[in-house]
Amino acid sequence: IHQQVICALRYRGKFPYIQEMAAGNQTTVTKFILLGFSINPQLEVTLSVLFLLMYLLTLVGNLGMIILIRLDSRLHTPMYFFLSHFNLSFLDICYISTNVPQLLVNLSTRRRTISLPGCAAQMYLSLAFGMTECLMLGVMAYDRYVAICHPLHYTIIMNQKLCTQMAATCWICSLLSSMVINVLTLRLPFCGPNTLNHYFCEVPAVLTLACTDTSLTEMVVFIFSILIVFVPFLLIIISYGRILSAILRIHSARGRAKAFSTCGSHLTVVTIFYGTAIFTYMRPTSKSSLDRDKVIAVFYTIITPMLNPLIYSLRNQEVKGFLRRVRIHKGSSNC
């Protein structure tokens, strides 16, 4: 308590969004100031246009993927079930919408503040959606394993009921895990400074502003990172190890190429998303690394949701076939 009071007295004059609590003679942060990426006005205009375009591309691409899968009955398979409905495409729209609108407001109006409840909501939702994507990518790797290694039993194993249960489990586990981490984070005292070296409220960045020891919370974050991030990653490695073994036993070069094409899009997304997420969450929090962390966070919070529909459409024969049929049908209608 004494440490909190000293910290409060030290920073109260410098940071206007820190107010004194009457009951315990303590201070608490009421708002955070998001530093973002730059203080150069010209660069901020460029960044705002760039992020706005990326956000619009994400919305159009993922909504297009959902509509495309719903329209074509050939795409009503377990793989595309995990891409549409309330899964990957819908998830990417929600994920990018938790941080980019706030980022655009900060860049365009230079109003860099976010309230404590707003920060808590953003922290909870972004973490929950990120965890859900980790689990969903692991489930999709298992789906690819069954499709390639057990093709005759694929529709029996990956039935509608199992797919729904797996997707629901991903969402429930992520929402509950994020709640635990956020409760532990928000119980920490924040007496100042209130300047957050990030473009949105992310747990590792928020922990650096706590006025007390955060080792317990960091340990909980690390444990959940192992359960939610690393365990699905191991499932992906094991699944693709067996897939590779099965592909090497295929004698036809065309068959091997088709199998690699089926897995290529998923592997591309996994590499981008998991590589950056593991680097951020599965190591100790460091104030000196926050500048690097917020750049890395762009990959799994903005770039990956934007690229997912492009990767899955451009590298997928079924999707490209549907688009060709649409063009042919449109051309014949014009004639």
Image (spheres, grey):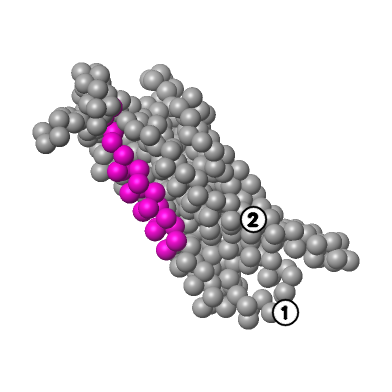
Seen in the picture, residue 133 relative to 139 is either above or below; the reply is above
Residue displayed at 41% across by 43% down: 217
Of the two numbered discs 1 and 2 in the rendering, the one whose residue sits closer to the viewer: 2
Instruction: Return the residue nearer the eye: 295 or 66.
Output: 295
Residue displayed at 53% across by 55% down: 227
Q: In 3D space, how far apart are the residues under numbered discs 1 and 2 (Cα atoms)?
A: 26 Å
For this view, does 105 lie left or right of residue 203?
left
Question: Which segment is the magenta one?
Answer: 172-192
According to the image, label 2 marks what residue?
234
> Which three-letter amino acid code belongs to the residue tagged 1?
Leu
Q: Determine which quarter of the picture holds residue 80.
A: bottom right
- Examine the structure image and report whether residue 325 is included in the region drawn in magenta: no
Label 2 crowd bin: few (<14), some (14–19), many (20+), radius 10 Å: few
Name the chief secondary structure element in magenta. helix
Query: Judging from the image, what secondary structure is the residue with disc 1 in?
Result: helix
Place of residue 275 in the rendered image (x, y in percent of width and height, measured from the top left): 60, 43
Which residue, as the protein is rendered here, is positioned at the far right?
Answer: 251
Residue displayed at 70% across by 59% down: 238
Q: Determine which quarter of the picture holds residue 140.
A: bottom right
According to the image, label 1 marks what residue?
152
Instruction: Return the residue nearer the eye: 330 or 29.
Output: 29
Place of residue 30 in the rendered image (x, y in percent of width and height, measured from the top left): 22, 34
